[in-house]
Image: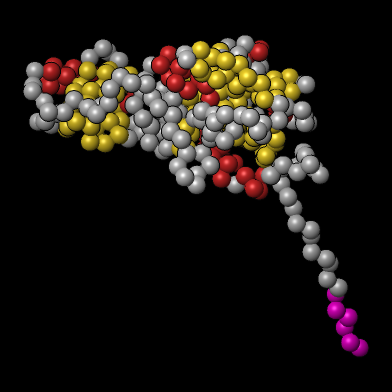
Amino acid sequence: MSLKKHLIIAALLVGGMQLNFADTLQLKDKSAVTGKILAEKSDSVVVDLGYTVLIVPRNAITRITKANETNAPAIVTAPAAGQFYAATTKTSAPRDVSTLVKQIGEAVVQVKTPGGLGSGFFINDDGYLITNFHVIEGETEISVEVYHQTDGQLDRETYRAVKIIAINKFHDLALLHIEDKNAPRFKPVTLGSSDALNVGDGVFAIGSPLGLERTVTQGILSTKTRQLEGELYLQTSTQINPGNSGGPLFNLAGEVVGVTNMKITFGEGLGFAIPVELVKSFLDHRDAFAYSTDNPNNPFRYLEPPSRTKQPVEAK
C-alpha cells in the first residue's frame, strides 16, 4: 500500500473514533490525520492514532493544529531575561502567511542612507536590528523607518539616531541600534533554524523592494547549500529585489530562517539568503565584530604583533 493511501485510510479510521486528543495534521491532498503528536522531527511528525503509530513526512503536511492550540495568530516571543535575542531550534506549527504578516510585519523596517535603502528587522524590543553590511557600507548617516501598529492602523515613524554596533563584511551582516530617547519598545522577531528546513518548504519575505515598503513575497526553499564565492546560501524562489537586502526570510511558522541579500539579475525566482545560523553566531560574538570609528571598514580588532626577538650571539 502506498504511503498516500495509508495516510488517507488512517485519516478516515480516526475520523470515526471518539478521541480524547485532537492534534490534527492537514495534508496536501486535503485529507487530515488526527491523533496525538508524539514527536516532531525536521523531516517527519510521529502521530499516535490510538491503535498504531504513524510517521508522516513533513513535505506532506500543510498545517498542524494541536489540541491545546486555537486559531489565534502566532505570538512573537520576547527574549528571556539576560538574552539578547529570542531563538528556537524547534519549528512551530505552520500558519497562513496573511495571519503571520499581521503579527510580525511590525518587526520589519526600512533602512535608509544617502546612498540608497534596504530592509532590516528587530531582534529585541530595545531597538537592536539586523541588516546587510552592504546596505550601510561606507555610510554614517543612517535612518530607520518603523511602522508602529496602533488601533489596527500602521503609523510610520522615522528614527535618525541610529548607531552601528557591529559589522561582519565577510558574511554581509550589520547590527544597528536605534538610540532615540523617545523611542518606544519595538516588536522583535524570533530567530528559527535553517537547519530544520527541507527543500520545498514554504518561505516568505517582507521588505522594501525598490522602495515599496512592507512588500510580501512568497516561495519555497529551492536548496539549502548553494555555494557562491566560497559561502553557502539558502536559495529561494521567493522574489528578491534591490531594497529587500537585509530583510528577513521567514518559515511558515513566522520564524526568521535567513537574511535576504542578493539575487541573480538575469533570471527569475533566483533569490538568496544568509542562513540564520550565521546571524546567531554573529550576534553571539558581536564584541569581536564591534564597529570602530578608527577603522570603520574593519570588523575585527587585532592585537599588536609581538616584537621580534633578537637572535642570541654565539660565544667564540
Side of 7 relative to 229 (left or right): left
Indicate the position of residue 67 as horizontal and vertical percent values.
Answer: 22, 27
The residue depicted at 51 percent of the width and 30 percent of the height is: 188
Side of 295 relative to 278 (left or right): right
Indicate the position of residue 312 as horizontal and vertical percent values.
Answer: 85, 79
State the residue in front, 134 or 76: 76
Q: Is residue 233 visible?
A: no
Indicate the position of residue 111 as horizontal and vertical percent values.
Answer: 66, 23
- Give, as a single range, the part of the protein colored magenta: 311-316
The image quadrant of residue 145 is top right
The residue depicted at 56 percent of the width and 45 percent of the height is: 284
Secondary structure mainly formed by the magenta segment: loop
The residue depicted at 46 percent of the width and 17 percent of the height is: 101
State the residue in front, 146 or 302: 146
The residue depicted at 27 percent of the width and 26 percent of the height is: 69
The image quadrant of residue 71 is top left
State the residue in front, 155 or 168: 155
Q: Is residue 66 visible?
A: yes
Indicate the position of residue 133 as horizontal and vertical percent values.
Answer: 68, 31
Give the position of the N terminus as an image quadrant.
Answer: top left
Residue 314 shown in magenta? yes
Side of 111 relative to 103 (left or right): right
Give the position of the C terminus as an image quadrant.
Answer: bottom right
